[in-house]
Amino acid sequence: MIPTITAFANSPDRGRGQARDMRVRWALEEVGQPYDVRLVSFAEMKQPAHLAVHPFGQIPTYEDGDLALFESGAIVLHLAERHAGLLPDDANARSRAIAWMFAALNTLEPPIVELGMATMFERDRSWFAERLAMLGDRVRTRLGELSRRLGGADWLDGAFSAGDLMMVTVLRRLHISGLLDEYPDLSAYAARGEARPAFRRAFDAQLAVFTAASRS
Ligand code: GTB
């Protein structure tokens, strides 16, 4: 059976691959699992049919037979555990790769999202410049720490893993801010992820949704 994921019918990022279906698409491509996509509007996401799968009325979701999942991290972990290619065989290395997934989602992504939200929604506030500087420094702290740990290696812990997949999707959210450019090793790390054929296929698939929507 081919799993079905959900994605934005009209992604506000205009096909830049910033929405969280991108990481699920990428994982599916890495493991060679074909998939279908159900495109949903913002209104449809809040309807009972979608809320039955995603309690918070968001994308992405993943449905495969009896299994319905939400949360991009849970979906990527599910795929990585059931297919070869995204987690090492060695039990300790596997746990470390999963720790990097959590680090991406719990330690790096929150300040990066906070910075993005402030940039989008708080520009007209009197305290915007001060807050932006503070949020930028919080992100820089994490990037500095990540850069030190990466230590010039290609990937975070040996071979490419679901930990790198998740970390690269999180770092990509900084492209617009220019902050990632302050860390050439992390820029190169993200670019290595983006150069993977599976990433390219996933990116092109989500871009095709935007291109088709903008033509209609
Ligand atoms: N923790 C959940 C997960 O990891 O799956 C978060 C899911 C989530 O935030 N989904 C967003 C959503 O459905 C889309 S990805 N939002 C609609 C809603 O809440 O009503 C977040 C996102 C949206 C848009 C951009 N963008 O335009 O650049 C980037 C990221």
Image: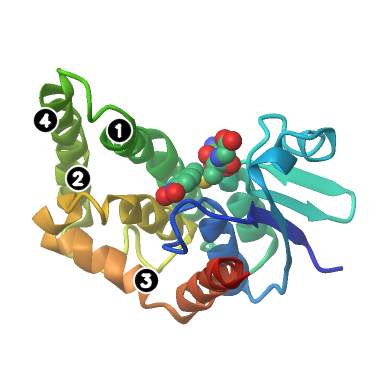
Instruction: Tell me: is circle 2 under 8 Å from ligand 1.
Output: no
Label 2 element class: helix
Residue type at mark 4? Ala
Q: Amino acid at mark 1?
A: Pro
Q: Earlier in the sequence, mark 3 or mark 2?
A: 2
Task: From the top left corner, tell me how far across and down residue 108 is, in percent.
Answer: 33, 39
For the residues marked 1 and 4, what is the alpha-carbon distance in whole angstroms?
12 Å
- Evaluate if marks 3 and 1 touch, with contact meaning CB atoms under 8 Å apart: no
Instruction: Identify the secondary structure beneath mark 1.
Output: helix
At horizontal 23% and vertical 30% (from top left) the residue drawn is 123
Comparing marks 2 and 4, which lies closer to the viewer? Answer: 4
User: Label 3 amino acid?
Assistant: Glu
Q: Nearer the viewer, mark 3 or mark 4?
A: 4
Between marks 3 and 2, how big is the CA–CA gap? 18 Å
Q: Dot 1 corresponds to which residue? A: 111
Q: Secondary structure at mark 3?
A: helix
Q: Residue at x 26, y 36 (%)?
A: 119
